[in-house]
Image: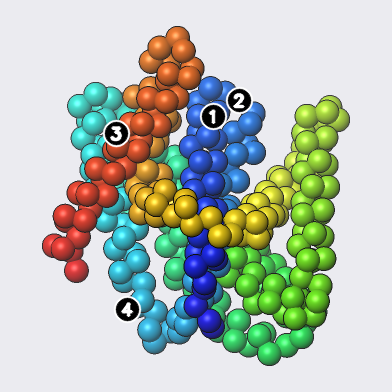
Amino acid sequence: MNSPNVDREVSISAVRLVAMSFIITCHIFQTYGSELCNWFNVGVQIFLIISGYLYSKKQIDFASAFDVFRRQIKKIMLPYYIWLCVISIIYALLYPSLLSVFSFIKALLCCDVLVGQGHLWFVPYILFCYIITPYLQYVRNKIYKYEIIKSTSLLFLFLLSIFILCRLYRCYFAPEIFSCYIVGYFYRDISQKLSEKGVGVLAISSIIAITVILCISRMYIQYFSGLVLSGVCASAFFYFKGYSHLLLGLSIFVILISIVKEHNRYSFILSLSDKYSYYIYMVHGLFILSPLNLLHLTNYYSINILLSIICSVLCGILLAKVTARLSSYVR
């Protein structure tokens, strides 16, 4: 595959910044009890689509997977463990009832999260995405030679198998979220084939149109219809929301990478976002979601939100510095 050009890298950085902003906004609305949090949480879907899209540019087979991902897993897990230790110490000193040896061990193994750190469920998801990437490349190599209709059909069957697998192991992984990485991984190949056929713009327009229809339908059912769903209908609507959210994330991703071009004057801001976004994501829960959140510090929402964001950014940068210092000791 050809390496991405500068404009494409700028657009991906811009999408990453938007996704980060969405996630923080989501958690602010969540703390204030606003329903808008259920829409701004699409930032997670966008993040996973970005990850899949970027890894589709790499050649990662089963033989090279360990060496390729060892460095990336270190980048993910080292700050996670550092932050887990910091949060555990804070809770042990201030909120001992929120921490137990069992909860710490489960968080250490990435099979649960501590109170106020619910956003860190993302860590095991992205790790599992890394694990299956060689399998995705294997599937991709098999279907790449086919025409667009057959390729898309096989991708749909692959997503269906992921759905069934996640339903069988539904205690943690949600297929509608997990599928975001897979869609991002195959997006570039399929979009290239559609462009070669001369229907790229039509396909993108169709995705956006379908997304709008699904989101309007979801809002009607959820907020205006007065329907009380239960049983099979409630389960069906749950997955309807999940997959419409996937399409919403994909639509935002497609729109942004299409329109954000040649804005290199923002490259400094975007490079800072690329460098620190994961660390800010890691720590922001302390100031927004945990019992120590700053969103009720004063009677002024704007001041509380501004303080929360500033503290999240500063603490994220500090975590990045500590991680960089300790990374030389971890092989």
Residue 49 locus on image (x, y percent) = 57, 60
Mark 4 lies on a secondary structure that is: helix
Residue 74 locus on image (x, y percent) = 29, 63
Q: Is residue 118 shown above or below 98?
A: below
Inter-mark Cα distance, 2 to 1:
6 Å
Mark positioned earlier in the residue sequence (3 or 1): 1
What residue is disc 1 on? 30
Q: Which mark is residue 99?
A: 3
Residue at (71% x, 46% y) in the render:
241
Quarter of the figure with the N terminus: bottom right
Mark positioned earlier in the residue sequence (1 or 4): 1
Quadrant in the picture for residue 151:
bottom right
Mark positioned earlier in the residue sequence (3 or 2): 2
What residue is disc 4 on? 67
In contact (CB < 8 Å): disc 2 and disc 1? yes
Residue 24 locus on image (x, y percent) = 48, 37
Query: What's the residue type where badge 3 is placed?
Result: Leu
Front residue of 252 and 331? 252
What residue is disc 2 on? 34
Residue at (60% x, 81% y) in the render:
140
Front label number (3 vs 2): 2
Query: What's the residue type where badge 2 is placed?
Result: Ser
